[in-house]
Image (spheres, helix red, strand yellow):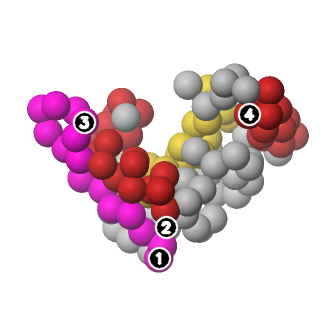
Amino acid sequence: MQTARSYLKKKEAFLIQVADEKSAIFVDELLWELPKEGFLPHEIASTTTSSLIAITLTRKNVNRAKSVFNLCPTPLICSSYEVIYDFEDSTSFHRKELSRKRFEAYRDAQYTIESL
């Protein structure tokens, strides 16, 4: 969650896109526990929020972030994002294929991508 912390320090909105409620709760708990020195203020949101760090299950840019961390198995194509963070998951053939398809979609849409 170093990425979220860096956006918070710059006072820039950062969105974390998740696929389901279980993932939202996991990320929510992670942001409350890390870093050890203190939590990262955030909220799980399905509608517009002023929170600098937001977790959402919707495909909406709920906090008007220019950067998003996509934790979904499908690409996140939205013209409001300048930077998309994504995992390249190689833990199985299926997940590796999903990662490859996401990156192809981002490349075709001419997005800036940072792989973590």
Which label's residue is closer to the chain start, 4 or 1? 1
Confirm whether residue 88 shows in the render: no
Which label's residue is closer to the chain start, 3 or 2? 3
Assign the magenta stretch its main secondary structure: loop
Percent x, y for residue 10? 32, 40
Q: Are marks 1 and 3 in contact (CB under 8 Å)?
A: no
Q: CA distance from mark 3 to mark 4?
A: 27 Å
Taking the magenta stretch, the answer to whether it contains residue 91 is: no
Which label's residue is closer to the chain start, 2 or 4? 2
Could you tell me which residue is drawn at 40 percent across and 49 percent down? 26
Percent x, y for residue 69? 54, 43
Residue annotated with mark 2: 62
Determine the secondary structure under disc 4.
Answer: helix
Q: Are marks 1 and 2 in contact (CB under 8 Å)?
A: yes
Determine the secondary structure under disc 1.
Answer: loop
Report the magenta residues as a range.
Answer: 32-47
Q: Amino acid at mark 2?
A: Val
Q: Quadrant of the C terminus?
A: top right
Residue annotated with mark 3: 34
Could you tell me which residue is drawn at 48 percent across and 73 percent down? 46
Residue annotated with mark 1: 47
Q: Is residue 37 above or below residue 59?
A: above
Q: Nearer the viewer, mark 4 or mark 1?
A: 4
Determine the secondary structure under disc 2.
Answer: loop
Which label's residue is closer to the chain start, 1 or 3? 3
Q: CA distance from mark 1 to mark 3?
A: 25 Å
Which label's residue is closer to the chain start, 1 or 2? 1
